[in-house]
């Protein structure tokens, strides 16, 4: 790489290039968003060899922050139909779309009379595309991430189906855990992480130590100073009046709706992909003035892509798109913690990796064949 090109890279990208010398396993990044899962697994020595993300704006942000030295695919369904076009890999990462299973997504779709979960053909069934890729490549391990509600969606039937496919049809040893990001960043955000190993290991998800939530960081650690925040992030008189009246209306009816007004010593609610609409779930109190939204830079910090000491994450899109992207993403420090907990078992699994099918029992080989045919 010419010196002039190297100089244009962020410190994160330079560290990424240097780190390639020490990469010891390969992974693929499906439904990649803006790269939160990738950040976690690069931190333990992984090298990304394939990325898939269909949203054009998310692709723009991803490409601005990671060297794209491999195929950057769009619609994963084109590749699940031909999984041999995906490079071999040790680990599969997939944050398959959460809207069909999220509480907000289900409520909205119910009100519109639209299907949700696996009945949502456009998003819910993308889990099966992931399963087909796992069936073909048989990676040593995988990490799947989704909203907490996945576990109890449709009275637990959705999650039971997912477990059946992963354990019984694909033959993986899986463990899962719901983790609240409040111990890592000043945000209450619960997500389910499903870890699967192809072979039996001593991995124990329950031994991952999560600091007590009350001892976590507060919003003061991610907020920009007042003179750094543009006045456009302060709510207009009309919007602030509307939110207050809307809260009063729902309070009188006994409903729980309300905006989340927080200060430097507080922890925020969950940042959602709809934050761009009115910012109501996280409003920063400005004493003597109307509250304001978080800035996109503060959202990057809230999700762990940045720290106040290192605003390296590049945000090349509009505020609206940035809010959507961060609201749909994972909390990077949580993923790093999960990846770090997997590392020892993953090293043993990768070092002991065999050919794709030689370790399969006849029954499991037949099951893998059937899943490829069924989802074909």
Image (tube, rainbow, N blue to C red):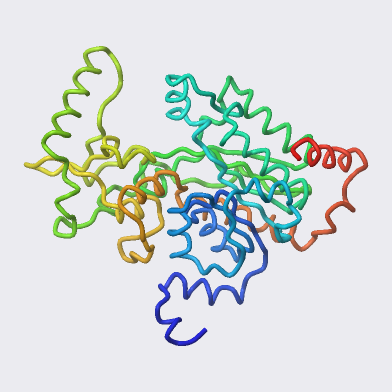
**Against 33, is 241 above or below?**
above
Estimate the x, y position of residue 211 in percent, counting from the top left.
45, 46
The quarter of the displayed image where residue 250 is located: top left
Residue 46 appearing in the image: no
Query: Is 258 on the left or on the right of 338, as rendered?
Result: left
Query: Is 318 on the left or on the right of 209, as rendered?
Result: left
Estimate the x, y position of residue 33 in percent, counting from the top left.
49, 51
Estimate the x, y position of residue 242 in percent, counting from the top left.
17, 28
* The one of 273 and 309 positioned closer to us in this rendering: 273
Residue 111 appearing in the image: yes
Q: Residue at x 13, y 44 (%)?
A: 286
Question: Among all residues in the image, which is located at the extreme bottom?
Answer: 3
Question: Among all residues in the image, which is located at the extreme left?
Answer: 288
Query: Is 255 on the left or on the right of 145, as rendered?
Result: left
Q: Residue at x 48, y 49 (%)?
A: 55
What quarter of the picture does the C terminus occupy? top right
Question: Among all residues in the image, which is located at the extreme top?
Answer: 253
* The one of 232 and 172 positioned closer to us in this rendering: 232
Estimate the x, y position of residue 28 in percent, counting from the top left.
63, 57
The quarter of the displayed image where residue 21 is located: bottom right
Query: Tag count in the figure?
Result: 0
Question: Among all residues in the image, which is located at the extreme right?
Answer: 362
Q: Residue at x 56, y 48 (%)?
A: 31
* The one of 234 and 214 positioned closer to us in this rendering: 234
**Against 315, is 200 above or below?**
above
Q: Residue at x 85, y 58 (%)?
A: 355
């Amino acid at each position: 790489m010419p010196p002039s090109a190297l100089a244009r890279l962020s410190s994160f990208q330079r560290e990424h290039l240097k780190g390639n010398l020490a990469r010891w396993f390969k992974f693929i990044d499906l439904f990649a968003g803006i790269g939160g899962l990738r950040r976690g697994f690069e931190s333990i020595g992984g090298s990304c060899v394939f990325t898939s993300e269909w949203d054009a704006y998310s692709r723009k942000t991803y490409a601005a922050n990671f060297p794209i030295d491999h195929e950057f695919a769009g619609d994963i369904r084109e590749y699940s139909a031909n999984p041999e076009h995906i490079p071999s890999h040790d680990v599969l990462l997939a944050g398959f779309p959460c809207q069909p299973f999220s509480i907000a997504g289900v409520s909205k779709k119910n009100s519109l009379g639209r299907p949700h979960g696996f009945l949502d053909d456009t998003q819910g069934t993308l889990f099966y595309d992931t399963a087909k890729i796992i069936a073909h490549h048989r990676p040593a391990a995988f990490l799947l991430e989704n909203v907490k509600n996945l576990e109890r969606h449709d009275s637990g039937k959705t999650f039971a189906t997912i477990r059946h496919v992963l354990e019984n049809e694909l033959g993986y040893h899986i463990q899962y855990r719901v983790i609240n990001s409040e111990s890592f960043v000043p945000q209450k955000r619960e997500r389910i992480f499903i870890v699967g190993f192809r072979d039996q290991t001593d991995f124990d998800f329950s031994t991952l130590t999560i600091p007590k939530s009350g001892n976590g960081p507060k919003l003061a650690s991610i907020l920009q100073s007042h003179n750094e925040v543009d006045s456009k992030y302060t709510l207009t008189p009309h919007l602030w009046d509307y939110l207050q009246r809307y809260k009063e209306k729902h309070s009188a009816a006994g409903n729980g709706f309300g905006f989340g007004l927080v200060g430097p010593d507080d922890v925020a609610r969950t940042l959602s992909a709809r934050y761009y609409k009115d910012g109501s779930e996280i409003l920063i109190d400005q004493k003597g003035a109307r509250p304001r939204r978080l800035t996109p830079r503060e959202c990057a910090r809230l999700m762990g892509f940045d720290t106040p000491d290192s605003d390296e994450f590049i945000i090349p899109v509009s505020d609206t798109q940035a809010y959507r992207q961060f609201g749909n993403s994972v909390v990077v420090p949580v993923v790093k913690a999960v990846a770090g907990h997997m590392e020892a078992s993953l090293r043993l699994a990768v070092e002991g990796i065999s050919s794709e099918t030689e370790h399969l029992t006849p029954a499991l080989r037949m099951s893998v064949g059937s899943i490829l045919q069924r989802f074909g």
